[in-house]
Image: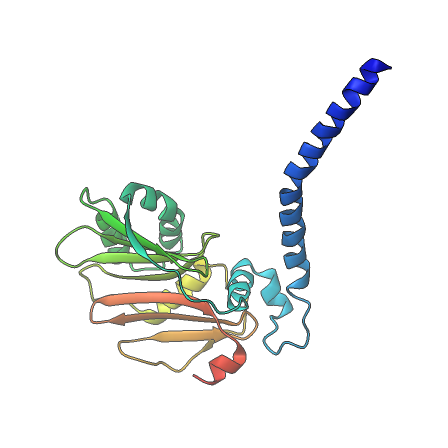
Amino acid sequence: MKLRERWLPLLGTVFLVVVCTALPFLWFAARDRQLDTTVWTNPADSDFLSAAGQENAVARELYYWRQQPSTYSSAYSEPTSAALALETVQPCLDGLHTAKVLPQAYLDAMDTLMQDPNLQCSTYSEASGMTTYDFQADEMGNYLRLTVSKYGTLTGLSGKLGLADGFDSADVASAYRTMLGLDCFTDWEAAEPLGYGSPAPCYSTEAQLYLIANMDRGYFSMSVTSMSPEAYAGL
């Protein structure tokens, strides 16, 4: 009886410690489940994402970030290890190769830049969860800039690789959609070109995504962002 009386308080203390330790994890798990199940249950929202959009990881992720309360950017640039940064963005670089998003000459020049022993990198992170990696290696001004979401989605790519020919913006935009897994949306439509260069923008109402590729005097770029149909109509 005395042994039992001695162990009961100890067991109670251990149980309390275990419960207190697990509570944060349980809270986060419940919060994640709540986000998954309730973020799509606001039928009164005119920007509500379509059922097809909800099924697509990229459309869902970018839509989610668009719905977050507006906050000031906490972006700041800082030097970082080029080797570690390259390791992080390698899946995106592989995707560019696999989908042949850029012409072969550009892919080769990109590989040459990223393999340069003098490669340097700076990064900055934003409150939205995006991180931009800025790679450069020489004094010629060539560079490659990738913006990647926290889940590894390449939301933006721009650069200068010493090339100006062979870049067809419409072809690049189409290959970029394929790389991101957005070919499942059949309502992509060509948008009105804005700005300089040879922009090839397109928009999907189902995905609520605005995607664009452009080449302007040797500087190329492509990006994808979540945009409501109302915002798109106002462009």
Residue 189 image position (x, y, % from top left): 47, 77
Q: Residue furthest bottom?
A: 234
Quarter holding residue 43: bottom right
Residue 57 image position (x, y, % from top left): 55, 58
Quarter holding residue 130: bottom left
Q: Is residue 68 left or right of residue 25?
A: left
Foreground of the two, 208 or 22: 22
Looking at the image, what colour scheme do you see? Answer: rainbow
Q: Is residue 38 left or right of residue 181?
A: right
Q: Could you tell me which residue is drawn at 40 percent across and 59 percent down?
A: 126
Q: Could you tell me which residue is drawn at 33 percent across and 42 percent down?
A: 84
Q: Could you tell me which residue is drawn at 57 percent across and 72 percent down?
A: 206
Q: Is residue 171 left or right of residue 210?
A: left
Q: Is residue 97 left or right of residue 71?
A: left
Quadrant holding the C terminus: bottom left
Q: Residue furthest right?
A: 1
Foreground of the two, 123 or 153: 123
Residue 211 image position (x, y, % from top left): 42, 70
Q: Could you tell me which residue is drawn at 57 percent across and 61 percent down?
A: 56
Residue 26 image position (x, y, % from top left): 67, 44
What is the number of callouts on the image? Answer: 0
Quadrant holding the N terminus: top right
Quarter holding residue 37: bottom right
